[in-house]
Amino acid sequence: MKNRLFILLTLLCLIWSCSGDKTSDTLQEPVVYRDVPEFLADSAYFYIQKQVDFGPRVPNTEGHKKTKAWLIEKLNGFGLEVQTQDFPAKTYDNQTWNLSNIIASYNPSVKKRVLLAAHWDTRRMADKDTERINEPIDGANDGGSGVGVLLEVARIISISEIKPEIGIDFIFFDGEDDGEPEHTNLRNNSQIWWCLGSQHWSKNPHLPGYSAFYGILVDLVGAKGARFYREGYSMRYGKNIVHKVWNFASELGYSDFFINRDSPEIIDDHVFVNKDAGIPMINIVEFSPDYGFGHYHHTHADNMDLIDKRTLKAVGQTVLFTIYQE
C-alpha cells in the first residue's frame, strides 16, 4: 500500500512539473488510507477446521450444540459484548428446530455501526450429490468459511493496537441452509424456508430500533479458485457499497478474486436484512453468472480439502480494510 502511494505521488509530481502549470488547484490530493492490521489466513483456517471437527452443525444435533458453546466462548474471549437470540422455527417438512442467532458487539455505545454477518449452521442433506444424499455435509465452505473469516476479524480487532473508530456488530445467523431439497417445489408465496435466522432477526432485532450504516455478509468465501461477482440484490440495495468494497479489493491486489461483473440475485441472509431491517447489506459470495454455485455446493465435496488460505486472505483482508476506513 505504501509503495502504491509513493508511485502515485511521484506520477502526480511529474505531471505537474511537465505541464508548466504551477497552480496547486489543478492537482488532486492523493487518497490516504488508514493503517490496517494484517488478516491471518492460517488463523481463519484453524477456525474452520474447528467447526468441521464438531461435526455437521445441523440444528437440534450435538455438533450444533457444541459449536454454539464454542462460538460464544471465543467471542467473549475477544472482549466483545455477546448475546444470543434463541427462538423456535418450523422447517419445510414441519419439524420444529431450536435456533440461535449469536450477536457479538465491538464498541456497543458508538452510534455509527457496521454489521458483519455469516451463517453458522450446515445443511442436513447432500441433495446435489450422487451418493449419501440423505447425510449431512461438513459445510467447510458453506457456513464454516464465513464464520472463520469473521472470527479472525474479531480476534484481530481485539489484539491490535490499531482499532476501528466505528461500532461493529458480528451476527452469526442460524438456520440459513435448510431450504427444501433440490428438485422439489415445496415453497409457497408466503414462506421461504431458507435463511430462518436472518428472517427472524430482521423482524426482531436484538436491540429495539437497531440500525447500521451498512452490512457485509460473507458466505462461501474459502474455496480454491473462488471468484466473487457483484450479486444482484447487493447491487439493487447497496450498489455504492459493492463498488467501494470491490475497489478496495483491487487496491489490495485481489482483483483476481473480486470480479467487476454482475451476477444474478440469490436468496441469502442479506435479502431479509435489506428488505425487513432496512439496512443496506451486500453479499460476498461465490456465485458465478455463468454456472451458478461451485461444484461442491450441497455435496460432500464441501470439506476441508476445498478450503484455500489464499481465498480466505483475499476476503478477510478486504473486509478488514473496509471497516478500518470508516
Image: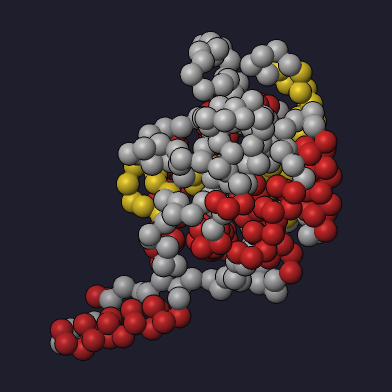
Horizontally, residue 77 falls left or right of residue 220, namely: right
Decide: is 11 above or below 243. Answer: below
Residue at horizontal 34%, vertical 82%? 7
Residue 78 in the image, given as x and y percentages of width and height: 78, 60
Residue 175 visible, this orientation: yes
Q: Measured along the vertical axis of the image, is residue 252 above or below residue 21? A: above
Camera-side residue: 69 or 131? 131
Q: Position of residue 197 (x, y in %)?
A: 67, 30
Please identify the quadrant where the C terminus is shown.
bottom right
Query: How has the structure been colored for display?
Result: secondary structure
Closest to the observer: 197 or 180? Answer: 180
Examine the rendered structure and indicate whether residue 108 appears above or below residue 161: above
Locate residue 160: give its quadrant: bottom right
Name the residue: 70% across, 74% down: 161
Residue lying at 59% horizontally and 39% vertically, measured from the top left: 300
Residue 169 at x, y percent in the picture: 68, 48
Please tell me in which quadrant of the rendered image residue 273 appears: top right
Is residue 210 left or right of 185 when viewed as pictured? right
Q: Give the side of residue 277 with respect to residue 10, left or right.
A: right
- Between 137 and 34, the one lying in front of the other is 137
Residue shown at 46% from the left, 45% from the top: 286
Image quarter in which the N terminus is found: bottom left
Q: Is residue 185 left or right of residue 78?
A: left
Relative image position of residue 107 (x, y in whole percent): 73, 56
